[in-house]
Image: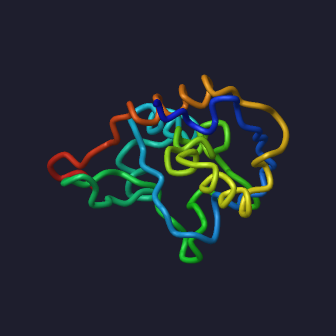
């Protein structure tokens, strides 16, 4: 007997831009090289200045990985009445709510729906599409600290 994911027939989600996934709760938004490149272009910044201004190093998998900072109230550093870098937002943000932890079970999906009004409404995402989001996310190589980076 195979364990078929509950999302095989698809799930409905359309972002309502309510920002509940960007605010009020602590968390990490780890960055990969493509995320960094898009954000540097969007903000017209150099890499070291960007890291010093918007990032922090987090102990992760035996090393340190680059994550966006949070404001003191736990909002994302780029939240200000909405996402200020929406078109260049990191992959982790673009693939929400199709994260492994959220689509692990129907219960996890429904629990997240209590916080996110876009879940179970709007566009239907196929099981194949959700699988592609998961594969893309799991294949990312996060930026790890090298030497004496800021």
What residue occupies the far top of the structure in this picture? Answer: 128
Left/right of residue 55 with respect to residue 8 in the rendered view: left
The picture quadrant where one finds residue 62 is: bottom left
The picture quadrant where one finds residue 59 is: bottom left
Quadrant the C terminus occupies = bottom left
Residue at screen point 70% across, 31% down:
10
Instruction: Name the spot of residue 115 as percent of width and height, x first.
Output: 71, 63
Left/right of residue 139 with respect to residue 61 in the rendered view: right
Instruction: Name the spot of residue 2 as percent of width and height, x first.
Output: 47, 30
76 or 42: nearer the viewer: 76
6 or 71: nearer the viewer: 6
Residue at screen point 38% across, 30% down:
139
The picture quadrant where one finds residue 126 is: top right
Instruction: Name the spot of residue 141 as percent of width and height, x first.
Output: 33, 36
Residue at screen point 68% across, 51% down:
83
Instruction: Name the spot of residue 32 as percent of width and height, x first.
Output: 40, 38
What residue occupies the far right of the structure in this picture? Answer: 122
Tally the numbered discs. 0
Way the structure is coloured = rainbow
Left/right of residue 143 with respect to residue 24 in the rendered view: left
97 or 21: nearer the viewer: 97
């Amino acid at each position: 007997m195979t364990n078929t994911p509950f999302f095989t027939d698809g799930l409905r989600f359309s972002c309502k831009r309510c920002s509940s996934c960007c605010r009020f709760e602590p968390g990490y938004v780890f960055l990969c090289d493509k995320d960094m490149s898009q954000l540097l272009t969007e903000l017209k910044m150099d890499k070291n200045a960007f890291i010093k201004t918007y990032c922090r190093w987090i102990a992760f998998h035996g090393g340190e990985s680059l994550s966006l900072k949070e404001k003191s109230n736990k909002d994302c550093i780029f939240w200000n009445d909405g996402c200020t870098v929406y078109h260049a937002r990191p992959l982790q943000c673009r693939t929400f709510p199709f994260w492994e932890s959220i689509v692990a079970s129907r219960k996890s999906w429904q629990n997240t729906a209590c916080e996110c009004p876009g879940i179970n409404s709007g566009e239907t995402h196929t099981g194949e599409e959700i699988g592609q989001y998961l594969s893309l996310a799991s294949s990312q190589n996060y930026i790890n600290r090298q030497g004496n980076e800021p």
